[in-house]
Image (cartoon, rainbow, N blue to C red):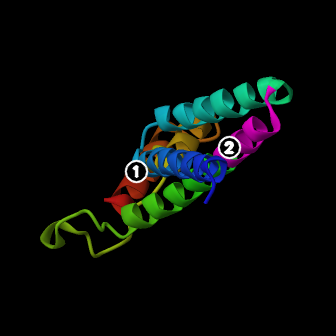
Amino acid sequence: MSGNRASIVGCGFAFAALGLLVGTLVAMSAQSLSQTVLAAIFALFGGSLLAFFEKLSVNGQTKASVGLLAISLGALVGVYSGVYINEHQLLTPLPLRTKSEPTKYLRENVLTDINAIDSKYRTGILTAKEAYEQLHAALEKRY
């Protein structure tokens, strides 16, 4: 393998590893910060590479393309593997795993039905008593 080819392959593996790390961390996180971090990383790499792409040599363009492809595919694989690990609780000790229902991946969106009830109450669609009863039923179903 020539030195140039080895350099391109090494760059690809390095960016794929970074993408895998970022994707896994994003999938395992329940905070909205992870979405911001992922967007910032792709904006940084994608925007920077595209801005300077025509100024690079053909070898540099190849490395940049391989790097961007590798980080994208790595992040994609990382997100899916992180979701799988999270949903099947593979990092949780066996005695502590919940067996009743699978965990919610998007834990930030768990309260959507509760927020809908609150919105209906604030707009006057539901009375206080109706809102209370619906909230109680939603929480009872969840926990």
State whether residue 121 is above or below residue 44.
Answer: below
* Quadrant in which the N terminus appears: bottom right
**Residue 86 among those drawn in magenta:** no
Q: Amino acid at mark 1?
A: Met
Residue 123 in view: no
Q: Amino acid at mark 2?
A: Leu
Residue identified by numbered label 1: 28
Q: Main secondary structure of the magenta part?
A: helix
Is residue 112 among what the camera can see?
Answer: yes
Q: Quadrant of the C terminus?
A: bottom left
- The percent coordinates of residue 24 (x first, y second) are 44, 52
State how far apart marks 2 and 1 are (Cα). Answer: 23 Å
Residue to which mark 2 is pinned: 68
Helix, strand or loop at label 1? It is: helix
Q: Is residue 131 left or right of residue 95?
A: right
Work out whether 67 lies above or below 56.
below
Q: Residue at x 58, y 43 (%)?
A: 116
| Pick the front one: 8 or 34 | 8
**Label 2 Cα neighbours within 10 Å, binned few <14 / some 14-19 / many ≥20:** many
Give the structural element (helix, strand or loop) at label 2.
helix
| Residue 31, above or below 141 | above
From the viewer's perspective, is 85 left or right of 10?
Answer: left
The residue positioned 81% from the left and 30% from the top of the image is: 53
Q: Residue furthest left?
A: 95
Q: Residue furthest front?
A: 2
Q: Residues within 10 Å of mark 1 (few under 14, many from 20)?
A: many
> Which residue appears farthest toward the bottom when viewing the image?
99
Among the two numbered marks 2 and 1 on one chain, the one whose residue lies closer to the N terminus: 1
Q: Nearer the viewer, residue 120 or 25?
A: 25
Which range is magenta?
A: 56-68
